[in-house]
Image (cartoon, helix red, strand yellow):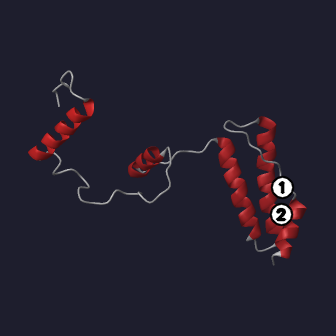
Amino acid sequence: MTERKPPGMPFESWVDRQIREAEERGEFDNLPGKGKPLPDLDRAYDDLWWVKQKLRSEGLSMPLPPTLALRKDAEESLAAAAEARSEGEVRLIVNDINDRIREAIRTGLSGPPLNLMPYDVERVVSDWRANR
């Protein structure tokens, strides 16, 4: 489309004319996805939808900042402790994540604030017993 908008013509009318003429020439006939519903139309609006879609289509993943990765690991550790087969296993899981949390607090990690403190091992064990 090399034609410029003529002076004095409203922009919307000029754009509408360009689209109509392109349709008449059949320039939109072989577009991928023609006649198919738009994907993800029923999802809630997300400002970064296009970034996430591009990452998915390229088969890429974005690594989390270290502080967020540790928070995720801490949540997964608590879930694993809740499913542990023995009290010893619960203590091992919680002590391991607590060591990582203490190290992160001591040395600092990049990313958003950690906002995480070591877990009370006895409380986690008590909760594990109560759920058995």
Query: Is 25 positioned to the left or the right of 108 in the image?
Result: left
The residue positioned 20% from the left and 32% from the top of the image is 14
Quarter location, residue 12: top left
Work out whether mark 2 precedes mark 1 in sequence or the reverse, and give the earlier one: 2
The residue positioned 37% from the left and 57% from the top of the image is 39
The furthest residue to the top: 7
Pick the residue in front: 4 or 119: 4
Query: Is 22 positioned to the left or the right of 48 in the image?
Result: left
The furthest residue to the bottom: 132
Query: Mark 2 — residue?
Result: 91
Q: Is residue 13 above or below residue 98?
A: above
Q: Is residue 72 above or below residue 1?
A: below
Q: Is residue 38 above or below residue 106?
A: below
Query: Mark 1 — residue?
Result: 119
Q: Position of residue 15 (x, y in %)?
A: 23, 35
Q: Secondary structure at mark 1?
A: loop
Quarter location, residue 81: bottom right
Q: Position of residue 75 (x, y in %)?
A: 71, 57
